[in-house]
């Protein structure tokens, strides 16, 4: 009698396993490499800018671009351009940094992948970008520039709304060349 119970138990377990969906690979996000892709600093008004009181108006432009490198590897590049301008249209400095990362991502759906590339990856890269910007500005002879943390989730949501509005308005977003995914924000 115990044999039939064991057989019933085994067949029940097999039936449960057969009816459960295949879970596949568990979601994984791993940093493969973080690197400085490009950096530039320009102080077009030096040395005159150092003779004036330093109260600049800062203009920031930040965006993220993602590109599939292989099946599970993605390059994400976080780019920031900062222009420090004084009264009278004098430009103190212009700094641009492209902080890159290669991320191994697998076991996620396409919509989750887009969120990871647009939110998690830039959030990971931002401290490295901030350090690079600060180092360039200080080496250029200016006071440290300590950038506040950026809410990449809010930027991602805003970019998705803008893309949806463009699609509803009939305007096509410019197509990217090669295998580059569109700019997420």
Image (tube, helix red, strand yellow):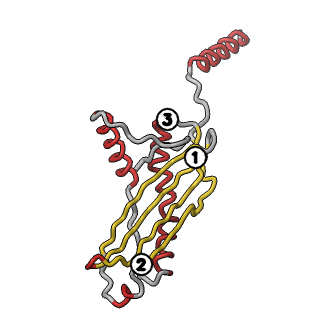
x and y, in percent, of residue 127 in the image: 49, 64
Looking at the image, which is closer to me, 43 or 19?
Answer: 43
Using the rendered view, name the quadrant where residue 35 is placed: bottom right
Question: Which disc is residue 44 wearing?
Answer: 2
Earlier sequence position, callout 3 versus callout 2: 2
Measured Cα–Cα span from mark 3 to mark 2: 44 Å
Marks 2 and 1, how far apart at CA: 36 Å
Dot 2 or dot 1, earlier in sequence: 2
The residue furthest bottom is 51
In space, the residues marked 3 and 1 are separated at their CA atoms by 13 Å
Q: Which residue: 44% across, 50% down?
A: 119
Q: Which residue is identified by label 1?
A: 74
Q: Nearer the viewer, residue 153 or 47?
A: 47
Task: Choose mark 3 or mark 2, whichever is in front.
Answer: 2
Badge 3 vs badge 1, beta-carbon distance below 8 Å: no
Check whether the beta carbons of the residues at disc 3 and disc 2 lie within 8 A of each other. Answer: no
Residue linked to disc 3: 110
């Amino acid at each position: 009698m115990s044999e039939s119970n064991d057989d019933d138990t085994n067949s029940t377990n097999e039936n449960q396993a057969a009816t459960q969906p295949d879970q596949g690979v568990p979601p994984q996000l791993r940093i493969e490499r973080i690197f400085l892709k490009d950096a530039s600093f320009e102080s077009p008004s030096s040395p005159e800018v150092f003779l004036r009181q330093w109260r600049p108006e800062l203009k920031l432009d930040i965006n993220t671009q993602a590109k599939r490198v292989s099946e599970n590897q993605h390059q994400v590049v976080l780019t920031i351009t900062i222009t420090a301008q004084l009264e009278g249209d004098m430009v103190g400095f212009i700094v641009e940094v492209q902080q890159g990362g290669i991320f191994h991502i697998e076991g996620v759906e396409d919509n989750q992948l887009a969120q990871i590339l647009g939110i998690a990856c830039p959030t990971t890269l931002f401290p490295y970008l901030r350090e690079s910007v600060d180092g360039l500005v200080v080496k250029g002879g200016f006071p440290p520039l300590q950038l506040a943390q950026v809410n990449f989730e809010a930027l991602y949501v805003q970019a998705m709304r803008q893309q949806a509005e463009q699609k509803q308005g009939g305007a096509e977003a410019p197509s990217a060349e090669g295998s580059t995914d569109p700019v997420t924000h």
